[in-house]
Image: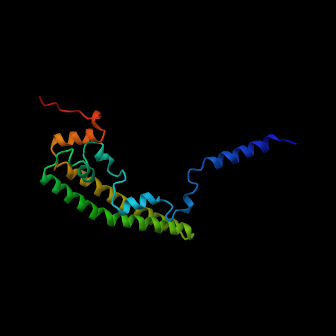
Amino acid sequence: MKIWPLIASIAFVTSVHAQTPYAGMQSRSIKALSDQQIADLNAARGMGLALAAELNGYPGPSHVLELADKLELSADQRAGMQRLFDSMKAEAMPLGAKLIEQEAELDKQFATRTVTPESLKASTAAVATTQGMLRETHLKYHLSTGSILTPAQMTKYAELRGYGSGHKRQHHH
């Protein structure tokens, strides 16, 4: 009796089961989105969509408002930032809702075994378009934020957020 192939196959099966990072995700209502992502989309949170701006020195309105005191924002700056934040939310929330709906539709096609190559192409293109619009929305408001803050406040923001060392600082003597 050859015992080695049996041991090898048991070892293989065990390692396969030990390495399934998706285990547990099958109970999600929309498989491609976690509850946290759904909550973030519904609340118009950035979810890292604006990192290209954020990490290159263009702060977003929500973080600027959180740091308003430390950045010593003027009353006008505060009001302007709040307007930006409100506009951003008003724009991003319906896009987030649309993305959730589109992901749910894609999920349903697979769940009900009704997916076809054509429906798959249409659904993934729709999701990608909405994701692109959502990302552009978040980035656009980071761009607008830069026009409200002074260069000194931008530098201070980067330092407060822990990005300071990578930026070239201008020293004014």
- Total labels: the figure holds 0
Q: Is residue 112 toward the left or the right of residue 136 in the image?
A: right
Residue 60 in percent (x, y) is at 26, 51
Q: Residue at x 27, y 36 (%)?
A: 164
Q: Residue at x 24, y 46 (%)?
A: 58
Q: Quadrant of residue 168?
A: top left
Q: Quadrant of the C terminus?
A: top left
In the rendered image, the vertical position of residue 35 relative to residue 6, given as above or below = below
Q: Quadrant of residue 25?
A: bottom right
- Color style of the picture: rainbow
Q: Is residue 110 toward the left or the right of residue 167 in the image?
A: right
Q: Is residue 167 toward the left or the right of residue 18 in the image?
A: left
Towards the viewer: 93 or 9: 93
Q: Quadrant of the N terminus?
A: top right
Query: Residue extending furthest top?
Result: 173
Query: Residue extending furthest right?
Result: 1
Towards the viewer: 80 or 52: 80
Residue 89 in percent (x, y) is at 28, 62
Q: Can residue 162 be seen in this snapshot? A: yes
Q: Residue at x 16, y 30 (%)?
A: 171
Residue 55 in percent (x, y) is at 30, 43
In the rendered image, the vertical position of residue 145 relative to residue 121, given as above or below = above
Residue 67 in percent (x, y) is at 24, 47
Q: Can residue 33 be seen in this snapshot? A: no
Towards the viewer: 91 or 133: 91
In the rendered image, the vertical position of residue 59 relative to residue 31, given as above or below = above
